[in-house]
Image (cartoon, helix red, strand yellow):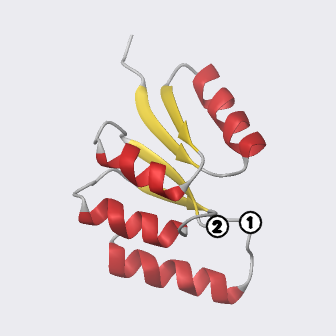
């Protein structure tokens, strides 16, 4: 049996984060770690164990784009999937610009 992919979820919405973690762990394909704010996400993500990161854009301490930039500056090369409930054109463009400058 293959080893589970290590996944880090950075999201302040406890219900969403825990539901995502539960569903992903049930598949048996992921070993999930969770944090509920950006600074802890940078710290945990910089440890280099996560093979994939799910990152909320709207966090209470620093926004997800800044978390992404800091992770990349720390040398993290794992894929980062940014999550948001925002659906406006400005948010989409802002996310694309952040991704282009931070290589997220």
Left or right of 90 in this view: 42: left
Answer few, some or many: residues within 10 Å of disc 2's Cα (few below 14, many 20 plus, some between 14 and 19): many
Front-most of 58 and 43?
A: 43
Instruction: Classify residue 17 by image quadrant.
Output: top right
The x and y percentages for residue 16 are: 74, 44
> On screen, 86 above or below 38?
below
Percent position of residue 9, x then y: 54, 44
Residue pointed to by mark 1: 85
- Tell me the distance, in whole angstroms, between the alpha carbons under discs 2 and 1: 9 Å
Q: Residue 98 in the image: state x and y as whole percent.
A: 44, 79
Tell me the residue at 44%/64% (across/down): 67
Residue occupying image coordinates x 74% and y 66%: 85
Q: Is residue 100 above or below residue 3?
A: below
Left or right: where 50 falls relative to 24: left
| 48 displayed left or right of 55 | left
Say which of marks 2 and 1 sits in front. Answer: 2
């Amino acid at each position: 049996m293959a080893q589970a992919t290590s996944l880090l979820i950075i999201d302040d919405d406890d219900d969403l984060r825990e539901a995502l973690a539960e569903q992903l762990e049930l598949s048996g394909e992921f070993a999930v770690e969770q944090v509920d704010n950006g600074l802890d996400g940078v710290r945990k993500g910089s440890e280099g164990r996560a093979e994939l990161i799910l990152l909320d854009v709207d966090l209470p301490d620093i926004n997800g784009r800044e978390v992404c930039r800091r992770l990349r500056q720390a040398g993290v090369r794992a894929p980062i999937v940014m999550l948001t409930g925002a659906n406006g054109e400005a948010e989409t463009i802002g996310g694309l610009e952040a991704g282009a400058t931070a290589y997220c």
